[in-house]
Image (cartoon, rainbow, N blue to C red):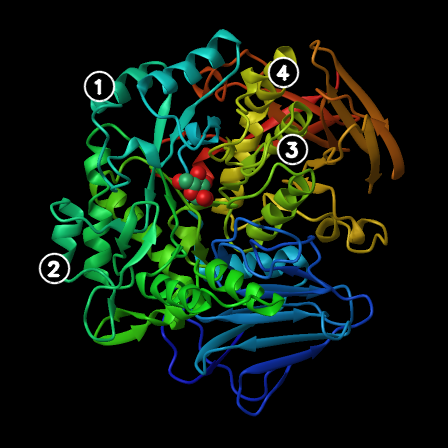
Amino acid sequence: MKKYSFGNVLDTKAVTVKVEKAEGEMPYFTVSQDNHSLKYTLGKDARVYGLGEQVRGINKRGWIYVSNNSDNPHHREDAHSLYGSHNFLLVTGGRDKFGIFIDTPGRVTWDVGYSDMDELVITVEDDAYDIYFIEGKSERHIVQQFRTLIGRSYIAPRWALGYGQSRWSYMNEDEICEVVDRHHENGLPLDSVYMDIDYMNEYEDFTINSESFPDFKDFVSKMKKKNIHLIPIIDAGVKKKDGYFVYEEGKEKGYFCKKEDGSLFVAAVWPGESVFPDMLNEDAAKWFGEKYKILLDMGIDGFWNDMNEPALFYTPQKVEEALNYAISLKGKKLDLSTWWAFGDKIQGLSNNEEDYKLFYHQIGDKKVRHDKVHNLFGYNMTKAATDAFNKFKPEERTLMFSRSSYIGAHRYGGIWQGDNFAWWSHIKLNMCETISLNMCGFVFTGADIGGFGCDTTQDLLLRWLEFGIFTPLFRNHAALGTRRQEAYQFKEKTGFRHVLGMRYKLLPYIYSEYMKAVLKDDLMFAPLAFDYPEDCYAVDIQDQAMIGKEVMIAPVMEQNAKGRYVYVPERMKLFNFHENGEVETHIYEKGHHYIDIALTDVTFFIKEGCAIPVSMAKALSTNDVNFENPEMIGFADNEAEYEYYHDDGISTKYDLANNITILKYKEK
Ligand code: GLC
């Protein structure tokens, strides 16, 4: 590993290991005179991986990506930035094989063969940054070294790998009870129900609307008795309202971000006009983090942190400007270009670049303008919360995942993949992001299954769940105003029961793989290219994934498809779990095959010589899963062994060596 530094770098704390600076010239890249731009010539066959949460495929070649945490509910293929910034790339397949990590809290542009197909040009906005080069004998080896550099990933409680149902919003106790009861009545397993912003009093963080939840503590405990965890959302913006304790306290202590003249920076988010805790100021972050205790004390054991890019719907100044502009047009005949300009003024109010330059952070004794450290805001919100959990509940894990992130945040929480759509292409995006995020340390991740924006369909939800079964975060979430998409809303009850049930049957394997990936700094999800680098078909596969060392998945991601073509890179056994309880298996030789996969089938492949642990018992929650003595399924002529990680799922003592047992499988 080689580290180079330019200028006086602000420590993002992404890296946890001390690396000495290297001498001499930087490898692979030519650096521009002003140090802002790095250029590398990509070989014809070079493939480029990484960048965590980003649009497009597993191989990132052919687009231009920008690390700039953005509230981007449009989430289309032509986007450049999503909610997180993960500045790690891995180049392979051509003449070189290396990883590169650029540690800088500001904006980075990654032109990966967009302007010129054969060039990788990285442009860093800041003058000061650290850059690491990692070499290794394989792609996995490079990733493992990078993961070791950035420190062990966050570990979620095991129950958080159960199925979660979410919606913006379940408005009150009755609505939540209905969700729970209808899952149970229909034999649909469930471990958590997510509470979106409407549980609060006027969208004020750390408050509960007492009309909708008259005795919240009691309600939380009643739900626990039904094996249901309630997971409230916490937003980054604090409502600017006299008398609201978080606002009053933060203002008094000087903990909110300020403008240059020292006045409070105000922008609108869900609560209306809001102020923003200075998450980069240690004291302010500690103060905000410790507020989570209010909910911990009511029995809450999991949270999701939102709007923490931070999203800014508008600032009062910009609204004023837009209104003045509109007034200036009054009485004039609008030509087309003025009409466009008028539209842009209004549409440009949200997450406006200029607004991010209006406020400051107090980092130690330095006052730093927000845009310079923009990508660290959500990271430090998550850290603040997890630091508090470690203080108040050191023995037990607390669920924490965030929308916005930077590398480093992976040690404090997971992430969900933001506001996607009920589009078929977003199942694939979910898979590609999960793979790339694993490389960047975010192992506890998943997307809004069924799609957040726009109306889902029964078949989309089923197919998405069939993929989601494998992601650690397994949550169905939808936006306000969309069609209801809880599994029980659809006709195919048996199908949903079967598909959700399969998650629980596979949980011994999924949890074990999740924990091993975290504790060994390894990938749970990997591209086929990493395991079959010499296979000319495997290296190009963008719609299949390897899970652990044993399993390959090839999800159906097209509407009305009754199956799909699958590339099988070595001899494997297909397991097809049908809705009627039958398990069909078939051995496939290396090659391309068309596989029938009916709408409610759950399928995956096991490599020859491998086996995985499963719990075939019927489960309505993770409590019903047999983690102690799982059964084995596999594909072996003789015997196969599986390295099984098993612990109590809740304590914060993670002992890899003592929690591993070797399970044996013998073909009947
Ligand atoms: C944001 C979140 C979404 C949430 C909504 C309302 O759009 O990404 O998950 O439902 O805000 O809180």
Which amino acid type is marked by label 4? His
Label 1 Cα crowd, 10 Å radius (few <14 / some 14-19 / many 20+): few
Residue that mark 4 sits on: 498
Is label 4 in contact with label 3 (beta carbons under 8 Å)? Answer: no
At label 4, counting other C-alpha atoms closer than 10 Å, the crowd grade (few under 14, some 14-19, many 20 or more) is many
Question: What whole-number distance in Å separates the C-alpha atoms at marks 4 and 2?
Answer: 53 Å
Name above or below for residue 621 compared with residue 519.
above
- Amino acid marked by disc 3: Phe
**Which numbered disc flags the more N-terminal residue, 1 or 3?**
1
Q: Comparing marks 1 and 3, which lies closer to the viewer?
A: 1
Quarter of the image holding residue 245?
Answer: top left
Q: CA distance from mark 4 to mark 1?
A: 33 Å
Q: Which residue is mark 1?
A: 218
Q: Nearer the viewer, mark 4 or mark 2?
A: 2
**Which mark sits nearer the N-terminus, 4 or 1?**
1
Separation of residues labelled 1 and 3 (CA atoms): 36 Å
Q: Which mark is residue 467?
A: 3
Type of the residue with mark 1: Asp
Q: What is the x, y in percent for residue 238?
A: 25, 50
